[in-house]
Image (cartoon, helix red, strand yellow):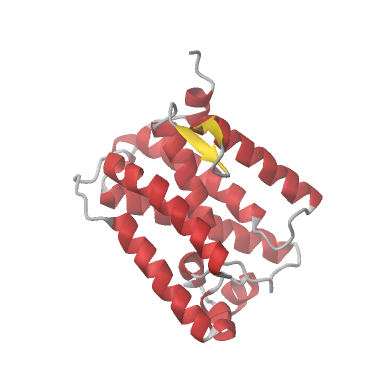
Amino acid sequence: MASFLRRPFRYSYYNATIILIIANVLMFVVRMAAPQRTIVSLGLIPDLVLQAGAWWQVITYMFIHSGFWHILFNMIALFIFGIQLERRMGSTEFLAFYFFTGICAGLATVFINESSGMGMIPVVGASGAIVGLLLAFASFFPDTRIFIFGILPMRAPVAVMVFIGLEVIFLVTNTMAGVAHLTHLAGIVFAYLYLLVRFGINPITIFFRRR
């Protein structure tokens, strides 16, 4: 079973990151043309998923963004981390990782939000998958420095740990309402599981290795 789960895809590179960015931009144009209809149909609304069978939303929500700054920052992150990870993994593996992380983060959001009475609150954005890319990037390139806010240099693992800490604080204190902190954290968890099972990589070991 373990050998099957770790069987590599044949390596190929076909600019999947750029394709994802183009798809997100096109869907943003559609959302601008019909904002409410797009959110209801393609955003992630837990009650609709569970009660009306709108399971496609656990995929489509990743391509819907709430506004210009939302999609801008997500696409910048997707480009920065995605290009290097795609070259390292290969395009097929990269897409498998991206969609596994995003879909599983969406499913976790569906069941947790629905059970907590927030089932009609829509969740949108590629962030669940993109924070998974951040964890993978820090695992494959742990010595790379990331400039937080464009000015604060941090080793990639440190940036990931700071991000996780802030997300936990925001979630517990209900700070920055309107941001899907739960989805972000779920993306980290499922990215960790993918790296552990698929690649045999434990990010925790890499992050805290002796230097």
Residue nearest the viewer, comparing 22 with 3? 22
Q: Does residue 42 sit above or below 77 in this rendering?
A: below
From the top left corner, tell me how far across and down residue 189 is, in percent: 55, 43
Q: Name the residue at 57% across, 78% down.
A: 39
From the top left corner, tell me how far across and down residue 93 is, in percent: 30, 48
Q: Name the residue at 68% across, 71% down.
A: 121
Q: Quadrant of residue 8?
A: top left
- Report the quarter where the N terminus lies: top left
Q: Name the residue at 52% across, 57% down.
A: 73
Q: How many marks?
A: 0
Q: Does residue 110 sit above or below 2 in this rendering?
A: below
One can see residue 103 in this view: no
From the top left corner, tell me how far across and down residue 151 is, in percent: 56, 39
From the top left corner, tell me how far across and down residue 146 is, in percent: 49, 36
One can see residue 133 in this view: yes
Q: Report the side of 85 relative to 57 (left or right).
A: left
In the image, farthest residue toward the top: 211
In the image, farthest residue toward the right: 173
Residue nearest the viewer, comparing 70 with 1? 70
Q: Name the residue at 34% across, 54% down.
A: 95
Q: Does residue 20 sit above or below 32 in this rendering?
A: above
Q: Quadrant of residue 123?
A: bottom right
